[in-house]
Amino acid sequence: MMTKMWSQRRTMWIATGAGIVMLTLGSWFMTGWERHQVLPPDEKTSDQSQTEQKERSLQGMPMSPSQETGPPQAYAMVTPTKQQLIGVKTAVVETRPLETTVRAVGRVDYNEERITHINLRVSGWVEELFVDYTGQVVHKGQPLFTLYSPDLVASQDEYLLALRTQAKVKDSPLAEVHEQAEHMVDAARDRLRLWTVSDQQLDELARRGKAKTAIPIYSPFSGYVTEKKVFRGMFVEPGMRLYTIADLSTVWVNAEIYEFEVPFVKVGQQAALTFSSYPGQPFYGRVSYIYPYLNEQARTVKVRVELPNPGLRLKPEMYGDVLLKINRGNQVAVPEQAVLDSGTRKQVFLVRGEGLFEPREVKVGPKIGAFYEVQEGIEAGDRVVTSGNFLIDSESKLMAAMDMMGSLGMGGIKMEQAQMGQMDMGGMPMGETQPEKTTQMAKASGDKKAGGLTLALSTEPASPRIGENLIRVTLKGEGGNLVVNATVQLTYTMPMPGMMPARVPMKPGKDGAYEAKVNLGMGGRWDLTVTVQRAGEADVKETFPVTAGGGGGMSGMPGM
């Protein structure tokens, strides 16, 4: 019995060690290929001696602070010869003026604040038509047409009658009579005013003393007729749109800018515009509005620029180029090539001298031209790597893996010992990973509650094995009802340095559960992380540890 248990433990640690060695081999092929280049004997010996000395000096060096949010990384060591081979270039972080230009295509449109619709408040027939085609220019106070309206004629007669009555009772000694007559005049005048009869027309009517059958209708604004729906002899009713008049003395230009450019553009910002119709003649305006929604297909935001239009040279529907100059002032800036973005964090490599490079996590603002605005992590005067940093990043991860292996008692492993079963596991703390404890941990994981959900995970087979396994996740709400309208992702990985997680979508299966098939390529502990997304709810993420059994072989591990 003890022999069998010892064999199982040894197999598990052999498999784990093999995984670490394979990680080391992968990093070695990425970053160590130059070690096999032909070098002059003296130079090669010198480089190897320096490398060995610095590797010894790096033992016990603390990991980069960035390990808190990503894979462990250590100081990278790259000899001058290797730097030359991989093309390492550096630059100094400086305080510099950050300026750029946002360019967009704009389209000229009418100024909606200067568009007028002409309609009436009384019915009647159009007799004479003075403005009779689209595109005609009109001025404020210019007659558009004449209207015969029985209601207007009757109201004019009432007004004239009230004026005559007022004149007859002006000598009456009774104040009430004067007040009544004046009230009748005011009421008749107000009725005509409500029907858009002007005071000038009322005065003319009083002087004439006779109702006019055809009342002229005047334009309340100046502009161009962009729409005409009235004709001679036509019967019109209240609310009918007869004309649309647009003032083109100022126009709008609507432009689409990309989502990442939105923080740079502000209302009131000056804009320069050029049009192919007027080459070499820039027009200037200001941003008057930024629309509060996004174009879902193009992922752009509409920006409105308002500008004067002297000589009416700009016509609606013209296209032009809009240029918005962005000036962020003097800021600490780092070249964009120096920043490595993993999706979850950003980091740079600081030059520490003598071939040492320190990984440093940074927080940056928006990219302005070829630079990022630095918010945290580095300062002006720091020297960073701008070329070759991907290979230095691999070297840093390799150093971290080697340091980890050393802490596990595997620092003496040679590459030729990577064959299964040939590694000395004597330094391993074998008593710390007893299968019984791992099994208890898997059983203790149980259901998990988060975000108003209860998550239950099960596997088929019940005891996960090396190779393909079916994972089922059941989601229940606070009332115990199944949740079937969620988007569920499953991420699985082994908790070991350098192991990249694999992600698969979970699809609805039987009994209301979500299902996905995963390939557990190696025996040992695996962390299964379930991410649940629901409309209008915060994402829920929970991790379930399981143990894959069935031997110490490896079968298509993710990230290896």
Image: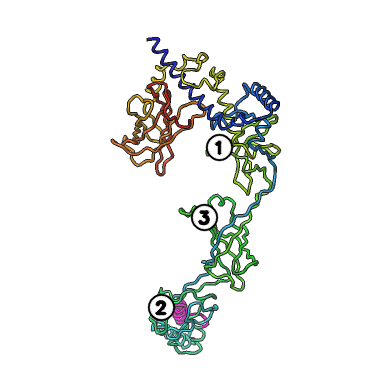
Q: Position of residue 233 (x, y in %)?
A: 40, 84
Q: From the viewer's perspective, tell me whether residue 397 is left or right of residue 233.
A: right
Local SS, label 2: loop
Does 476 sit above or below residue 169? Answer: above
Does 266 sit above or below residue 385? Answer: below
Rendered-image quadrant of the N terminus = top left
The residue indicated by pointer 2 is 122
Magenta-drawn stretch contains 197: yes
Magenta-drawn stretch contains 198: yes
Distance between mark 3 and mark 1 Cα atoms: 27 Å
Depth check, mark 3 against mark 1: the one in front is 1
Q: Give the image quarter of residue 452.
A: top left
Circle 1 packing at 10 Å, graded few (<14), some (14-19), many (20+), is: some
Residue that protrudes farthest toward the top in the picture:
2
The residue indicated by pointer 3 is 301
Looking at the rendered structure, which numbered label has been put on residue 383? none
Of the numbered discs 2 and 1, the one sitting upstream in the chain is 2
* Front residue of 80 and 76: 80
Circle 3 packing at 10 Å, graded few (<14), some (14-19), many (20+), is: many
Local SS, label 1: loop
Residue that protrudes farthest toward the left in the picture:
511
Q: Residue at x 34, y 31 (%)?
A: 470
